[in-house]
Amino acid sequence: MGEPIYLTRERLLEIEQEVNNLKINGRKEIANKIAEARSHGDLSENAEYDAAKEEQGLLELKISKLEGLLARAQIIDTSNLPTDEVRILSKIKVKNRKSGKVHSYFLVSQEEADYDNGKLSVSSPIGKQLLGKKLGEVVKINVPAGITEFEILEISR
């Protein structure tokens, strides 16, 4: 079955809605495309039909992947998680000791990661190095620009 995938309740609901939408609307749309392509005659030389069938295969693959993700999903209740160290679903503030810039991150599973919105995967190089660290601790992290030191300023839920 694979390793569990830790999700927030909100992200789980988003994925469930996406699966339902793909099953209902996505399948209906592709069925219409296939029907339209069939109406054009000979299927052996019908590029529209081939494209619609390929699109159908990709849609079913996406649905299957999302359903597999849902089967492995585990909701993490953040209300009872301690804030004494960085864990998955921790909200943290770190200071780059070289530049002085402060960054805020929300540590999430790889499936929820969205760096542009401050959601950092716990399996990313930075996320891995921050896990288990405590408030005030300085962490040396190897990033593309070289080794950077981050000081943990805040840990919350």
Image: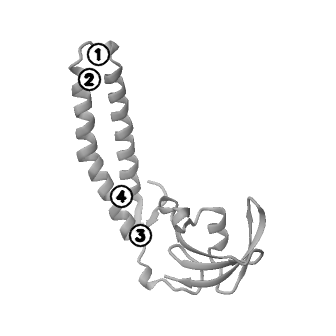
Would you say the residues marked 1 and 2 are in contact, meaning their CB atoms lie under 8 Å apart?
yes
- Disc with the residue nearer the chain's start (1 vs 2): 2
Query: On the rendered structure, is 149 left or right of 86?
Result: right
> What type is the residue that disc 3 sits on?
Thr
Would you say the residues marked 4 and 3 are in contact, meaning their CB atoms lie under 8 Å apart?
no
Position of residue 151 relative to residue 23, above or below, is below
User: According to the image, label 2 marks what residue?
Assistant: 37
Q: Nearer the viewer, residue 144 or 126?
A: 144
The residue depicted at 76 percent of the width and 70 percent of the height is 148
* Quadrant hosting residue 32: top left
User: According to the image, label 1 marks what residue?
Assistant: 43
Q: Nearer the viewer, residue 44 or 3?
A: 44
> What type is the residue that disc 1 sits on?
Leu
User: According to the image, label 4 marks what residue?
Assistant: 15
- Disc with the residue nearer the chain's start (4 vs 3): 3
**SS class, disc 2:** helix
User: What distance separates the C-alpha of mark 4 from that of mark 1?
Assistant: 35 Å
Q: From the top left corner, tell me how far across and down residue 112 is, in percent.
A: 47, 62
